[in-house]
Image (cartoon, rainbow, N blue to C red):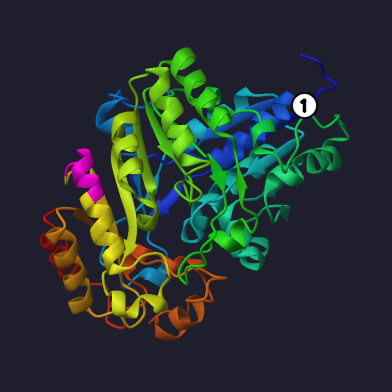
Amino acid sequence: MNKDVPNILLVNPWICDFAAYDFWAKPIGILTLASILRRHGFSVYYIDCLDRFHPKAAKTDPFARFGRGHYIKTTIARPESLSDVPRKYSRYGIKTEWFKEYLLSIPKPDLVLVTSIMTYWYKGVQEAIKIIKEIFPDTRIVLGGIYANLCHDHAVAHSGADSVASGPGTYYILKLAEKHTGFSAGLKYTPEDLDSYPYPAFDLQHKINYITVCSSIGCPFSCTYCASRFLNPRIMLRSPESVVDEIKYWHDKYMVNDFVFYDDALLVNSETHAIPILEKIIQTGMKLRFHTPNAVHIREISPKIARLMHKAGFKTLRLGLETAAFEKRKDFDDKVSADEFTRAAACLKDAGFTKNQVGAYLLAGLPGQTTASIENSIRIVLEKNITPVIAYYSPIPHTVMWGKAVKSSRYDLEADPVFTNNSILPCQQEPFSWEKISYLKNLVGS
């Protein structure tokens, strides 16, 4: 190995929570940074603390449930601030000793990059950084990701990282690496052109059982409960050719059949984006399965798009409904009307989608929300022969609804991100209730 080439370690930390499940969750951001660094001559190492297929983990079928599955789980002490929640708290992911063994097996890194996802998962970030510092006390650790951006001051004060980065890392990753390693490389991609990016480094994983794909970044809507516009203020699109070429690459080289779209707005501008992508997928003749856990915009679903999605192989389709209380829609967003939902449901049914394949997200636990309104939304969705999917609300800083959430919560949301955990229904005035969760689950038939 060339000793003049810097070693950079990238880490996806553990989840610490009451519940967690691999619902097609991959840290596509840090894997994209890994591929960019690798293209520019850096020596890259990667460890995923959520790795379900670690060599020491119990063997499981990686392709069951289209690639989804349970994380390894270790019960740990609940945060003292959540002592009123009568649920077990766990660290999800690999054993800490496996993490330490990996760190001791690699050359000393010149820089460590740690990502972060949910704001209330920061306990896993803290633990990973603490262990890294024990083994590499002189190496600079930089934290980025969603928690680092949404709760920047908290991350600076509590994460343990030497510095906390803000904004999309693809714009500054090479300058950051040069600052801490002294290694300079000529730019081999254009940050404003998604087609110029290398594919995310999924090959650094122990197993590639599904691939997450971003055909676009950003969202044209400004929903009161969502931070997408804050995290990605610019909307950027890949060319349809680039998207299909990537899908074909992973299918041909790694035999991947399940692909998961991570877009916030996959169907927006469909005539020049989604429709050409779908048509080109169909033209390849590949027999693939597609999934949209981030939800698609209902208003954009036409008979043509529904037919193309069905023919292309979409198996798990989630709709961003959020509520069927259309008379109060402006309190949430301006994404869909009652007529548009009815029309989209009919289009999907006519195209051949079944109730089990199509689910509509419904938010529960919103500030001031009544159980009766959730019940009514569930009933309306069921009437359309679509599966209601309850999505419990997590208050998010830098959103329009954040102020209302802070006022309505029984916790001090601004004091600690751990209180924003959707598992505890933080914006309900009454304490956590298993009965309420069970009641809603029974309503949707799950």
Q: Identify residue for label 1.
A: 40
Residue 224 appears at what percent x and percent y?
47, 72
Label 1 neighbour load within 10 Å: few <14, some 14-19, many 20+: some
Pick the front one: 86 or 358:
358
Tell me if residue 274 can be seen. yes
Residue at left 17%, top 71%?
375
Query: Looking at the picture, which amino acid does disc 1 mark?
Result: His
Pick the front one: 328 or 81:
328
Residue 357, located in which quarter of the rendered image?
Answer: top left
Residue 374, located in which quarter of the rendered image?
Answer: bottom left
In magenta stretch: residue 125: no
Tell me if residue 69 can be seen. no
Pick the front one: 287 or 148:
287
Residue at left 42%, top 53%?
16
Residue 200 appears at what percent x and percent y?
58, 31
Q: Magenta span: helix, strand or loop, mainly?
A: helix
Quadrant where the N terminus is found in the figure: top right
